[in-house]
Image (cartoon, coloured by chain):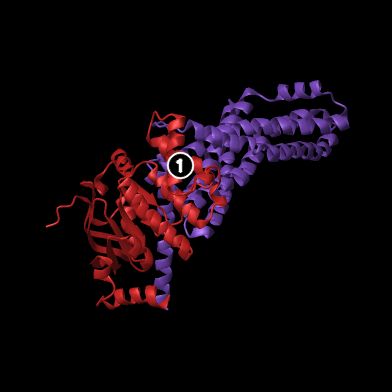
């Protein structure tokens, strides 16, 4: 019995050790990004290539999802507002909800699923097949080529995608409002722009930058540190999605608290 | 006394992964334009030895000098300069699977040799693809190549930077016997044509016999035997080396 208890304690302490070692590794991985991003040589071509992959190739999925979110959210909000005879407030309500929260969140979650898992799997597979080692022995810094370029690309492209999602979702909402309330596009967007403030848009872009950074960094980290052969590739992709989504929600919560400080003023 | 130039000098090299001791005091001299074959069973640390040589791994103790410089003491820039003199042909070829054969070969070239014109780059790539006998694959993706073709392209990619030392990690692993002979011939051709010094990591004695000037057998973290094929194998007294020989040439 005493032996079993000691073994359990040993296993537990090893898990705690591994957890903190993992945190330290992750911290060093992130720190290395800031050490390398400003130092030449710059991988402009690869950054542009990744921006294209992340941005353009995500468009169909983002368009469809954003459009559906706009329609569904409008439909779901109408009954509550109509109870108070306030359906004319629909464009304002939808605009604020989409720009402040739903646009960035939906885009980030979809990007975490599509882009984050893709990055995790790609880099993990490169690691397993020694392509990263091959890069290193041929005098190329694989961290800079693979990680810095992808993290920059996600950081720049997620805000762009968020703005695009906002627009598509608002168009979806407009079609729904137009069909039910017979509101013209100019009236709809006049109300949208009158209710959305600069702070809303600015905060949305800033938090999208963080979302993008998180998606790229987590995907790269899980890929770069993967092991156990092909099984590790799947695990890296899976972990990239799960951890990114978790961190995105935490960042959303934190950003909400910070932005509210400014709103009260 | 041997007056040949030593390009690699390894002394009392130790490397462990956690509690698993892989290299336990390895000593080795590699001479210019020599083909040295390192043999040993799986997990004996053959690949670890050459990974330390290119700075992919770091030894726990001992020294690994390449061209008179201790690898573990080199800074990032110096290490990268050293790596350009060492070509590493990986076990699974490690071709970048999102790039064509041409892009795979361009990748190290354009990053390390500045001011090359497009024509010069193309000429260099075509020359090397001719040398490995695969000029027709230039626009193919790695997924469209056979195992043997991948190995050849992998070798061509490492040759693109004119390395002085070639490291081959299990060059014949997973290939059929005829393709193995082709790869062995390629290793010999590379040495003859580009005057390279080579280390071939393998557990295939046919490959070792065909390509090696000297054999070094890793046994339990140290070289158990070092010499020509005839000196090391046919009349080996060490039972482990004898059984290695027997399994390769008799049982198979």
Circle 1 — which element? helix
Nearest to the observer: residue A12 or residue A152? A152
Q: Chain of mark 1?
A: B
Q: Is residue B199 above or below residue B250?
A: above
Q: Quadrant of the N terminus of chain A?
A: bottom left
The residue sitting at 28% across, 41% down in the picture is: B75
Q: B178 above or below B162?
A: below
Q: Residues within 10 Å of mark 1 (few under 14, many from 20)?
A: many
For chain A, give the colour: purple
Where does the image place residue A111, in percent across and percent down from the top left? 62, 42
Q: Where is mark 1, residue-wise?
A: B105
Q: In the shown orientation, is residue A108 left or right of residue B110?
A: right
Q: Quadrant of residue B248?
A: bottom left
Describe residue B42's horizontal placement relative to residue A129 as left or right: left
| x, y percent for residue A165 | 68, 34
Answer with the quarter of the image where residue A72 lies.
top right
Residue drawn 58% across and 31% down?
Answer: A259
Tell me the quarter of the image containing the C terminus of chain A.
top right
Residue B55: tell me if it is visible: no
Looking at the image, which is closer to me, A200 or A133? A133
**Vertical arrangement, residue B102 with respect to residue A7, above or below:** above
- In the picture, one chain is red; tell me its letter: B
Could one spot residue A47 in this view of the protein?
A: yes
Q: Residue at x 66, y 40 (%)?
A: A106
* Residue nearest the viewer, comparing A261 with B244: B244
Residue A15, position as x, y percentages in the image: 44, 61
């Amino acid at each position: 019995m005493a032996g079993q208890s000691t073994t359990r304690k040993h296993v537990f302490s090893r898990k705690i050790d591994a957890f903190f070692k993992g945190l330290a590794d992750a911290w060093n991985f992130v720190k290395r990004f800031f050490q390398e991003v400003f130092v030449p040589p710059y991988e402009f071509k690869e950054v542009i290539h990744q921006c294209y992959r992340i941005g353009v190739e995500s468009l169909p999925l983002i368009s469809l999802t954003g459009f559906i979110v706009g329609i569904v959210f409008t439909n779901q909000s109408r009954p509550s507002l109509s109870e108070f005879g306030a359906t004319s407030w629909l464009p304002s309500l939808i605009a604020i909800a989409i720009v402040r929260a739903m646009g960035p969140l939906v885009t980030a979650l979809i990007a975490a699923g599509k882009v984050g898992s893709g990055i995790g799997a790609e880099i993990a597979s490169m690691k397993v097949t020694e392509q990263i080692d091959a890069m290193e022995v041929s005098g190329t810094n694989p961290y800079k080529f693979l990680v810095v370029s992808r993290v920059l690309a996600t950081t720049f492209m997620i805000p762009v995608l968020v703005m695009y999602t906002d627009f598509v979702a608002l168009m979806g909402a407009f079609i729904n409002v137009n069909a039910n309330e017979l509101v013209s596009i100019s009236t709809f967007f006049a109300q949208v722009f009158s209710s959305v403030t600069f702070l809303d848009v600015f905060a949305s872009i800033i938090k999208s930058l963080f979302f993008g950074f998180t998606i790229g960094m987590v995907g790269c980290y899980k890929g770069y540190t993967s092991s156990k052969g092909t099984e590790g590739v799947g695990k890296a992709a899976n972990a990239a999605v799960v951890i990114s989504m978790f961190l995105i929600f935490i960042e959303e919560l934190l950003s909400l608290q910070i932005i509210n400080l400014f709103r009260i003023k | 006394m041997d007056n040949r130039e030593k390009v690699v000098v390894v002394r009392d090299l130790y490397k462990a992964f956690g509690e698993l001791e892989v290299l336990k005091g390895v000593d080795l001299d590699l001479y210019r334009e020599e083909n040295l074959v390192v043999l040993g069973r799986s997990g004996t640390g053959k690949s670890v030895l050459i990974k330390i040589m290119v700075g992919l791994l770091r030894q726990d103790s001992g020294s690994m000098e390449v061209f008179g410089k201790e690898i573990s003491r080199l800074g990032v820039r110096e290490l990268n300069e050293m790596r350009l003199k060492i070509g590493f042909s990986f076990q699974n070829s490690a071709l970048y699977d999102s790039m064509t054969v041409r892009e795979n070969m361009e990748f190290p070239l354009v990053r390390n040799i500045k001011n090359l014109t497009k024509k010069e780059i193309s000429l260099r790539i075509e020359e090397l693809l001719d040398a490995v006998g695969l000029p027709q694959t230039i626009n193919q993706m790695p997924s469209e190549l056979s195992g043997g073709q991948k190995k050849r392209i992998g070798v061509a990619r490492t040759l693109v930077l004119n390395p002085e030392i070639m490291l081959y990690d299990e060059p014949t692993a997973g290939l059929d016997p005829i393709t193995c002979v082709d790869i062995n011939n390629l290793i010999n051709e590379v040495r003859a044509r580009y005057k390279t010094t080579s280390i071939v990591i393998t557990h295939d004695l046919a490959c070792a016999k065909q390509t090696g000037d000297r054999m070094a057998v890793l046994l339990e973290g140290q070289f158990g035997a070092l010499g020509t094929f005839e000196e090391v194998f046919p009349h080996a007294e060490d039972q482990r080396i004898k059984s290695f020989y027997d399994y390769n040439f008799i049982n198979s």
